Amino acid sequence: MIKFTVILLYLFLIFLISIVFKKYNEDNKEIVRKIIHIGIGPLIPIAQFLKINQNSALIFTGIVALMVFTNYNYKLFPTIEDVERKSYGTLFYCLSLFILIYLFWDKDPYALISGFFIMTFGDGLAGLIGKSFNSKSWIFFEQKKSLYGTITMFLTSLIVTCSIGYSQQNSLNLNYFTIAFIATLLEQFSILGIDNFIVPISSALFFNFLITS
């Protein structure tokens, strides 16, 4: 019970920060949404540290996914869905996390954390940097992408894979670059928020295959 109390308190803190930020930045809906997107990232290593078992993690994630689905339809907490385009990103976010927990919670937590961090930090920071600074941009599948955002995605993904991979292998090789490159390439496919699914799943699978195995 104490373990889940810690998890709930952490989630409450993230949502509280986003609500306070929204109060003073009503015109910047995207950055408020990214606070939640990025802030949930550390939740997985926290849960691993607390030794929460896989079934409990799956049930908890399933409940959150159901709440997100309900919110998507009824907008009970608009902060989560505030975005200037039609997107199922939050639904894909929860679905990818559920699958990652199912595949890797006990078998390869390094791959799980790597895939999830690439999505939360890489994709999250790419969105923030891309919208905050002007740079060369292009349209891909009706979604605007920027040079600075793409560079941020690659560098963040590389840092994530190198740091997590090195803690497991104590060595560095081109496989880390490969994973970061693939994640950055897949992040370009962001139509309807599908990148929140294909980026973490693919990154974790490649990490498991290229690094762990």
Image: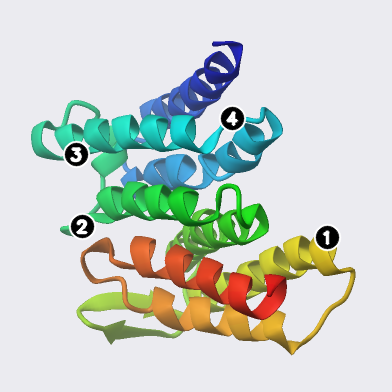
Residue type marked 4: Ile
Residue type marked 3: Phe
The residue beneath circle 4 is 52
Nearer the observer: mark 3 or 4; the answer is 4
Nearer the observer: mark 4 or 1; the answer is 4
Asked if the residues shown at circle 3 and circle 1 are in contact, with their CB atoms under 8 angstroms apart, the answer is no
Q: Is residue 151 above or below residue 23?
A: below
Asked if the residues shown at circle 3 and circle 4 are in contact, with their CB atoms under 8 angstroms apart, the answer is no
Mark 2 or 3 closer to N-term?
3
Residue type marked 1: Ser
Whether residue 147 can be seen here: no
Q: Residue furthest top?
A: 1
Q: Residue furthest right?
A: 170
Q: Determine the CA span between mark 2 and mark 3.
A: 12 Å
| SS state under label 3 | helix
Q: Give the colour scheme shown.
A: rainbow
Could you classify mark 3 by the number of other residues whose Cα lies within 10 Å: few (under 14), some (14-19), or many (20 or more)?
some
> Could you say where residue 20 lies in the image, as x and y percent from the top left?
44, 24
The residue beneath circle 2 is 87
